[in-house]
């Protein structure tokens, strides 16, 4: 019983973290119609910036949680203004290629600045240690990640359904030309959405930092996981991102505990299975290609 | 006139390539062997990308599979080289059939994500399945035996191996070229431009895409089978997505709209890599910057840009 509880909580913290990353990928795709291959690299950058702010500068964790994503947002605005603006009107392959180039650049820069070794960020005092829930011991930090994920989920839902900014973003996603006719500055929306996606990735990176060791391959791992989430849930679907993330979280949480030998393969098998029966993902819509 | 000049340049280039071991040092023999193998790898990628319009981020899966198949056959069975190459090709084609079955069903965006995810799955398998693949160390310590056909060639000699690679890459490229020029190749190009119209014309786009994907996988497997004895190791890096980035960059660098583009891209790529890694370790950083610049400013590649410029001058 206690094994199941801790596996479940473990699945939830992995799943909600993945949701934070994958939903950013989805929002950017929805409005800009590009898949940002560098999304995982931005997540990694958030984690490494937090590492520098906490371990080198000596800031408290909470300050880093606020500041590190802001740094990444500034970078994202620069990327949008100086690189992506060239290719928004081109074929989608060009945006895939350009963000892939960005991924190579950011990955190697991280390796140059912080080295190839593993770095560790300690959780803040308040969240260190563990708690007992239904007879099993759970790291407090893991609960913090779950709470953060749920708060963000509620915040995003509110943003998209109850605020003007959210409506503008949805309008731009549905029909950018029409939005422009209605006096919406879509140029600003595009930059804003790209920056917001980057903020989500970097925020996820800071949240993940005390839970996982930092290494220059962490961005690659998370982007592949996010792709699997998006494929399982359905590209561009908000509930799909949540569902896909929870499914992948469960696969990791229970697979890691009960089937360690094939754990690495399970996410791909899950993805292949979904593709066979629902080619556009569980929540995805659209006709077959 | 134009084709005659191009043919003359091509003949000269081939003659030059044949003469390399007699006029250049071992260092350059190695470099040219690498260029030829990676050129074939990039050309196989371009069948999927430049011709069919599917941007694959997992092409290294087939390259690496070819390399592992070659290493495994040489270690456990010691079959002749040509037979081992056939195993490399078949293994990669089979994998391409399985992965392609899932990938070609959906649009470009899904294809890109899926090819990357499946490519990294193959990497994960090679990394974890220690009993067969020897994990992160890779497979080494195999040696080339006979060539096959009763030919007596010392494949261990770099100059001999270079000529063997040259001959195989030449034949393979000729076959690939004929495929691209055939009516099948024309349909692939039509699919890239407008898949809806092709399917309205009564052709099954999905099947054509899958066949193109498998053919490309088979040729990538052949290139992988050639690289394993050259590097003397089959390691997981050959399957990693940074390896998948190489044919992408080579094709873009040379020009995706031309059959010879990827080969020229491979030559520039390998020469640049040799130059840059001699004074910095951050080759991937330079690679990323070049890729970004090429995509933004020189989307037609070096070959396309030069040909455009030539046309302009001749006007």
Image (cartoon, coloured by chain):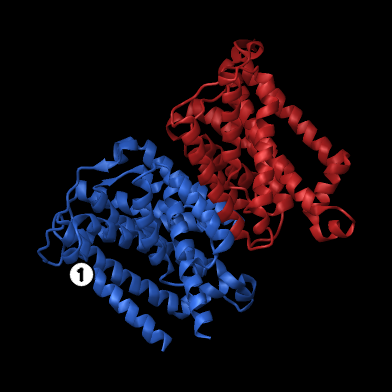
Output the letter for the chain in blue. Answer: B
Viewer-closest of B137 and B210: B137
Residue at the spot 70% in from the left edge and 29% down from the top edge: A149
Residue at the spot 49% in from the left edge and 58% down from the top edge: B100
Residue A276 visible: no
Viewer-closest of B248 and B221: B248
Q: What percent of the width, then of the height, locates residue A234? A: 67, 48
Residue at the spot 36% in from the left edge and 38% down from the top edge: B129
Q: Is residue A37 left or right of residue B176?
A: right
Q: What percent of the width, then of the height, locates residue A183? A: 89, 55
Q: The C terminus of chain A is located in which quarter?
A: bottom right
Q: Check the rendered structure and report the hue given to chain A.
A: red
Quarter holding residue A58? top right
Q: The N terminus of chain A is located in which quarter?
A: top right
Q: What percent of the width, then of the height, locates residue A72? A: 65, 36
Q: What percent of the width, then of the height, locates residue B275? A: 35, 52
Establish if A208 lies above or below A266: above
Extreme residue in the bottom direction: B1
Residue at the spot 19% in from the left edge and 50% down from the top edge: B77
- Label 1: few (<14), some or many (≥20) within 10 Å? few
Q: Chain of mark 1?
A: B
Residue A97 visible: yes
Quarter holding residue B11? bottom left
Extreme residue in the front direction: B313
Q: Is residue B261 left or right of residue B193?
A: left
Which residue has dot 1 on it? B19
Report helix, strand or loop for mark 1: helix
């Amino acid at each position: 019983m206690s094994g199941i509880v801790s596996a479940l909580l473990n699945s939830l913290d992995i799943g909600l973290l993945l949701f934070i990353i994958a939903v950013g990928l989805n929002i950017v795709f929805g409005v800009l119609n590009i898949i940002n291959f560098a999304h995982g690299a931005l997540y990694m950058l958030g984690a490494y910036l937090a590492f520098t702010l906490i371990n080198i500068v000596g800031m408290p964790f909470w300050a880093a949680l606020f500041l590190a994503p802001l740094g990444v947002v500034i970078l994202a605005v620069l990327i949008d203004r100086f690189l992506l603006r060239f290719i928004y009107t081109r074929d989608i392959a060009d945006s895939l290629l350009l963000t892939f180039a960005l991924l190579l650049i950011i990955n190697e820069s991280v390796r140059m600045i912080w080295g190839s070794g593993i770095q560790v960020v300690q959780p803040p005092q308040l969240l260190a240690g563990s708690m007992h829930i239904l007879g099993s011991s759970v790291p407090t930090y893991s609960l913090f990640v779950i709470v953060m994920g749920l708060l963000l989920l509620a915040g995003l839902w509110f943003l998209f359904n109850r605020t003007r900014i959210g409506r503008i973003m949805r309008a731009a996603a549905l029909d950018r030309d029409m939005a422009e006719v209605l006096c919406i500055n879509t140029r600003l929306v595009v930059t804003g959405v790209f920056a917001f996606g980057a903020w989500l990735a970097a925020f996820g990176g800071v949240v993940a930092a005390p839970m996982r060791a930092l290494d220059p391959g962490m961005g690659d791992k998370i982007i592949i996981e996010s792709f699997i989430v998006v494929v399982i849930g359905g590209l561009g679907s908000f509930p799909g991102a949540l569902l896909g993330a929870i499914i992948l979280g469960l696969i990791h949480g229970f697979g890691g505990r009960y089937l360690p030998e094939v754990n690495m393969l399970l996410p791909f098998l899950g993805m292949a299975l979904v593709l066979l029966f629902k080619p556009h993902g569980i929540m995805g819509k659209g006709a077959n290609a | 006139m134009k084709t005659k000049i191009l043919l003359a340049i091509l003949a000269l280039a081939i003659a030059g390539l044949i003469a390399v071991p007699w006029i250049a040092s071992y260092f350059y023999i190695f470099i040219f062997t690498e260029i030829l193998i990676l050129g074939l790898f990039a050309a196989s990628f371009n069948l999927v990308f430049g011709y069919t319009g599917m941007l694959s981020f997992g092409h290294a899966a087939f390259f690496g599979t070819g390399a592992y198949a070659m290493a495994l056959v040489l270690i456990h069975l010691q079959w002749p080289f040509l037979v081992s190459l056939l195993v490399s090709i078949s293994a990669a084609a089979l994998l391409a059939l399985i992965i392609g079955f899932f990938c070609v069903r959906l649009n470009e965006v899904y294809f890109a994500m899926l090819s990357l995810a499946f490519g990294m799955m193959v990497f994960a398998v090679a990394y974890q399945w220690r009993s067969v693949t020897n994990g992160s160390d890779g497979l080494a310590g195999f040696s080339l035996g006979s060539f096959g056909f009763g030919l007596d060639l010392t494949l261990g000699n770099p100059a001999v191996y270079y000529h063997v690679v040259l001959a195989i890459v030449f034949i393979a490229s000729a076959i690939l070229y004929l495929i691209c020029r055939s009516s099948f190749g024309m349909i692939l190009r039509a699919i890239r431009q407008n898949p809806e119209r092709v399917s309205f014309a009564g052709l099954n786009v999905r099947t054509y895409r899958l066949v193109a994907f498998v053919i490309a996988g088979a040729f990538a497997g052949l290139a992988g089978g050639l690289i394993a004895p050259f590097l003397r190791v089959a390691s997981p890096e050959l399957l990693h997505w940074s390896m998948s980035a190489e044919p992408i960059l080579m094709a873009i660098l040379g020009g995706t709209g031309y059959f010879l583009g990827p080969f020229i891209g491979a030559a520039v790529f390998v020469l640049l890599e040799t130059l840059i890694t001699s004074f910095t370790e951050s080759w991937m950083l330079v690679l990323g910057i070049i890729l970004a610049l090429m995509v933004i400013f020189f989307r037609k590649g070096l070959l396309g840009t030069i040909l455009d410029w030539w046309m302009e001058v001749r006007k």
